[in-house]
Image (tube, helix red, strand yellow):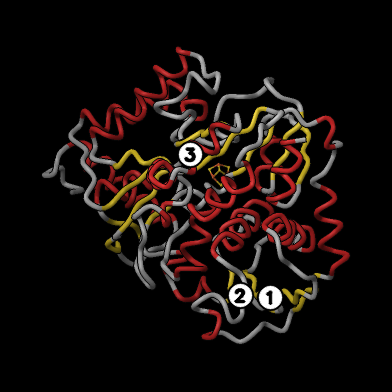
Amino acid sequence: MLGGKSGQAIQKAMEILVALGEMYGAACMLPVTSVQIAGVSYDNLGEAGLAWLDAMAVGGGKVRTLTTLNPAGMDITNWQTLGISPDFAVSQMRVIDAFARMGVLTTCTCTPYLTGNLPHFGEHIAWAESSAVCYANSVIGARTNREGGPSALVAALTGRTPAYGYHLDKQRQPGVTIEVSARLQTTDEFGALGKAIGLKLNGVNAKPVCYICGIPHADLEQLKTFCASIATYVGAAMFHMEGITPEASTHKPPEWTIPITQADLEASHQLMNDAMPDAVDFVSLGCPHLSIREIAHLAELLNGHRVKKEFWITTARPTKCMADQMGYTAIIEASGAKFAVDTCCVVAPIKGRFKVLLTDSAKACYYASSKNRFKTVLRPFDDVIAEALR
Ligand code: F3S
C-alpha cells in the first residue's frame, strides 16, 4: 500500500497511518474490523475538508471494512422542515456523496452499535465519535483510540490502524477509583455523574482511566448517555464499571479513590441549568441518538398531545425505520415534534436560531453552550416531554 500498488488514495492513507504510528511508537499495524468516521457535518468540514474527501474518492479510495458515519449537519431527506438552507443542503450532500463513492455506509449516527456496526469484545476498530469510542472500549470491550475524522477514514481505506494507545492492555489499566454513593436513576443523572467526575479530576493533566464502583445497575440508555458525558467532561476514551462492564473484573480498584456523593451529583446537575424552564424555545432528545426503546416511550408520552415548542428528536435512520414500522413516527409527528434523523442539535447549523435548550443530555448542554451560545435546562427524559407539552 505504501509503495503505491493499490493506488494513490491508499498510498496517501498508509503514509498518514505510518506517520501516526511512528509518532506514537507503534510496533506494528493492526487489522480493523469496523470504522466510524466523524467530522461529517459541512458546518465543521468546510470546503477544505470536502476537497480532501473528494481527492481521496477521485484517487480510487474504497473502504476495506464496515464503515459508517457520525451525524451530518442535516436530516438528509427532511432538511427543509428543520429550517436548513438550500445552500447548506447542497454542500452537505456533496460530503455524503464523497463518502458514498468510497463505499462508506451513509448511515449517520453516533450510536453505530445500535444499527448494525457492532464490533465484539476484543476486536480492534477505529472509531471517531467520542461517546461511541467510550461505549466501544468500555461497554463492548472492543479496542479503539479516539480517532479524528481523517485518521478514521484512512483506517477504513486500508483496513489498518497503528498498534498504540487503547489497543494495548497497558493503556486500559484503571488509575483511579470513583466511589459513587449518589443514587442514579435517570439519563440526566448519569450525565451529571460524568460532569461530577470531570469536576473532581479538574487540574489532573493525564486523565486516568476511571474504575467506577457503587452503581448496582445501568441499562443501555443510561450507559450511552454516561459515555457521552464522561467523554465530554473528562475527555475519557474508556472507563470500567464494577459488575457492569466486561473488563472491570480483570482489574483491582486503584488505591487513589475519589468519592461522588449525592451533593456532588446535585451540584454538577445544577451547573447545567442556567435558565428557567419558562424561557425554553428549543427542546431536543437524542444525544446520543435515541434507541428504539426510548422512541417507543416517547410515543407513549406524546400520544394525543401537542407540543408547544420546537422539538427535535434525533436518531439514526435505521432506528427511525423501526419507529415507522411500529407506528411510533405517526404518533410523534402528530404531536408536532419533528424527527431530525442523520443529524443532531450540536452538528446542525442552528447557532442564533434559539436561546434556551431543554434536554436530558449533559453532553448536549456542554455543546449548546460552548458552540451555539444557548442557555440550557437539564431535566429527566419524562420531564423534558412534560415541559414541551406545557
Ligand atoms: Fe451524538 Fe450529536 Fe450528541 S453526535 S453524542 S447527538 S452531540
Label 2 packing within 10 angstroms: few (<14), some (14-19), many (20+): many
The amino acid pointed to by label 2 is Met
Q: Which residue is drawn at 72% across and 35% down?
A: 357
Q: Which of disc 1 and disc 3 is earlier in sequence?
A: 1
Per the image, the residue denoted by label 1 is 215
Per the image, the residue denoted by label 3 is 329
Q: Residue at x 86, y 36 (%)?
A: 276
Position of residue 142 measured from the top left corner of the image (x, y, whole percent): 41, 67
Position of residue 104 measured from the top left corner of the image (x, y, whole percent): 28, 41
- Depth check: give the residue in front, 365 or 172: 365
- Asked if residue 180 lies left or right of residue 131, the reply is right
The amino acid pointed to by label 1 is Ile
Per the image, the residue denoted by label 2 is 241
Mark 1 or 2, closer to the camera: 1
- Depth check: give the residue in front, 326 or 9: 326
Q: Under tag 1, what secondary structure?
A: loop
